[in-house]
Image (tube, rainbow, N blue to C red):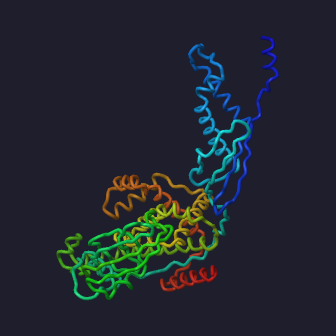
């Protein structure tokens, strides 16, 4: 007993923690390779603790509980104990390495545990890669020069809105002759995807003739140039190089041969603005309809002016901050970008038909556009931290209620749908972005200008940016 007591006295009151050796390498934009060497002492400590716990409860034939020798425990349970120890040590070492080195990691680290063996002696070494949040400095955010386009709502604009309403209420009717711009095609489509054994075939597909149109889910640039002037019975072919950031992973980054066999050509016949149509939209007279459109346009013009100023803030941030992003990060975030854009258009109060058309164009976005959207996400995240901006549930519910009222929906139903389809989280980010931009606009130097001048200034900025990049 005395000997045991002496040993306890000689034991240090607090044993120093055994640290792993960590090496970190930059292997690309926002990517790091972490190599961890877990010391033999740490491995031994983990295994000893596990066998001590096991020995307390282990019952082997011929031995009382807690009396089984270590060599028999190792023989029977060694494989499982070593697997558990390996996983615990790797997970703990990886998390400690990221925490101690202040790595702001995006997602979970990619660790292949099966390729690592727990050695009989010596340290255990393993490596893994992580994607980290980019590091950058924010530019000056006070006193930014912003132009506010001022638009007059007149009778011409009201007439344009009525014509648009009549087109939306129109019907597609068969026509003879050649395909024209903005027509609709009924066609059989064959897609020969790079690497596929057989072409994908789609019969009686509706195709809308636009500059960037979708053919069975594939974005085709200059589709109008391909089909305008053709007739029913003709076959048109083209090859599409799908962007590496395309939202549909099945086609992402692949070359696709597209074959369109035109079966029927249709033109849109706008609806007549008569008493029946007025009643359908809940108006008693054309004058009441015009007054309603005038009010909507006035509100829309103010929203568009605010949107134009917000876009100028985004352009300022994009031009004055440099962030390098790897292509795989952009590809992984492409779907999230689409959801955020959808939420942005909802906040702006755009109509569903306009949103659907914009989403078609967004799906065909180039890799550079996708990079810009992801870059903006990181910028806004840092601005939100700088200004301590957050979004409460009450604010989210308020925004959803406004959109629901605009669309004639129940707010709780819309929130439930957004939660189910995953867009609620992205909607929250979009609201936060709007608050960040609002904060910057509060301290901006805003000048009222005609829309034409604002457009020219924007084009000039874009040209200067392209020239700088070249």
Residue 310 seen anywhere in this rendered image of the structure: no
Q: Position of residue 398 (x, y in %)?
A: 42, 57
Quarter of the picture containing the N terminus is: top right
Is residue 17 visible in the rendered image? The answer is: yes
Q: Position of residue 414 (x, y in %)?
A: 36, 56
Identity of the residue furthest to the left in this view: 276
Q: Is residue 318 left or right of residue 201?
A: right
In the displayed structure, 189 sits above or below 329; it is below
Farthest top residue in view:
1
Q: Where's residue 115, x and y in %? A: 61, 46
Give whichever of 25, 271 is nearer the camera: 25
At x 42%, y 69%, the residue is: 193
Q: Is residue 408 left or right of residue 255?
A: left
Q: Residue at x 39, y 85 (%)?
A: 225
* 300 horizontally vs 67: left or right: left
Q: Position of residue 95 (x, y in %)?
A: 64, 45
Front-most of residues 284 and 386: 386
Query: For residue 214, what is the image quadrant?
Result: bottom left
In the depicted structure, whether residue 426 falls above or below residue 99: below
- Number of labels in the image equals 0
Say which quarter of the image contains residue 25.
bottom right
Q: Quadrant of the C terminus?
A: bottom right
């Amino acid at each position: 007993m005395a000997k045991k007591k002496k040993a306890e006295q000689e034991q240090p009151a607090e044993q120093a923690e055994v640290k792993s050796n960590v090496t970190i390498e930059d292997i690309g934009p926002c990517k790091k390779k972490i190599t961890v060497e877990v010391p033999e002492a740490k491995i031994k400590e983990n295994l000893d603790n596990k066998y001590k716990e096991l020995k307390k409860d282990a019952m082997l034939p011929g031995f009382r509980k807690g009396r089984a020798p270590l060599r028999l425990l190792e023989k029977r349970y060694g494989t499982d104990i070593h697997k558990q120890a390996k996983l615990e040590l790797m997970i703990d070492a990886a998390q400690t390495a990221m925490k101690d080195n202040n790595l702001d990691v995006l997602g979970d680290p990619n660790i292949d545990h099966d390729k690592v063996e727990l050695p009989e002696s010596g340290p255990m070494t393993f490596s893994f890669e992580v994607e980290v949040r980019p590091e950058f400095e924010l530019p000056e955010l006070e006193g930014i020069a912003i132009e506010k386009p001022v638009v007059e709502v007149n009778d011409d604009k009201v007439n344009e809105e009525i014509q648009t309403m009549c087109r939306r209420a129109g019907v597609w009717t068969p026509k003879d002759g050649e395909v024209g711009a903005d027509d609709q095609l009924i066609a059989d489509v064959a897609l020969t995807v790079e690497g596929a054994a057989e072409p994908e075939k789609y019969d009686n597909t509706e195709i809308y003739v636009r500059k960037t149109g979708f053919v069975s889910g594939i974005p085709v640039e200059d589709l109008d140039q391909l089909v305008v002037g053709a007739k029913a019975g003709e076959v048109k072919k083209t090859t599409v190089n799908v962007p590496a950031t395309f939202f549909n992973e099945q086609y992402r980054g692949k070359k696709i041969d597209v074959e369109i066999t035109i079966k029927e050509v249709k033109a849109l016949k706008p609806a007549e603005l008569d008493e029946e149509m007025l009643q359908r939209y809940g108006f008693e007279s054309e004058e009441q309809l015009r007054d309603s459109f005038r009010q909507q346009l006035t509100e829309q013009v103010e929203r568009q002016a605010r949107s134009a100023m917000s876009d100028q803030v985004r352009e300022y941030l994009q031009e004055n901050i440099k962030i390098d992003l790897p292509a795989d990060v952009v590809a992984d975030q492409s779907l999230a970008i689409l959801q955020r854009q959808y939420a942005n258009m909802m906040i702006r109060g755009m109509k569903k038909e306009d949103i659907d058309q914009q989403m078609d164009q967004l799906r065909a976005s180039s890799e550079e556009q996708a990079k810009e959207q992801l870059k903006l996400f990181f910028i806004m995240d840092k601005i939100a931290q700088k200004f301590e901006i957050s979004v409460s549930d009450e604010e989210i519910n308020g925004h959803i209620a406004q959109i629901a009222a605009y669309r004639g929906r129940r707010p709780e139903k819309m929130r439930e749908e957004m939660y189910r389809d995953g867009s609620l989280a992205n909607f929250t980010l979009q609201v936060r972005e709007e608050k960040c931009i609002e904060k910057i606009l509060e301290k901006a130097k805003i000048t009222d200008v005609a829309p034409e001048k604002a457009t020219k200034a924007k084009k000039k900025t874009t040209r200067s940016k392209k020239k700088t990049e070249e």
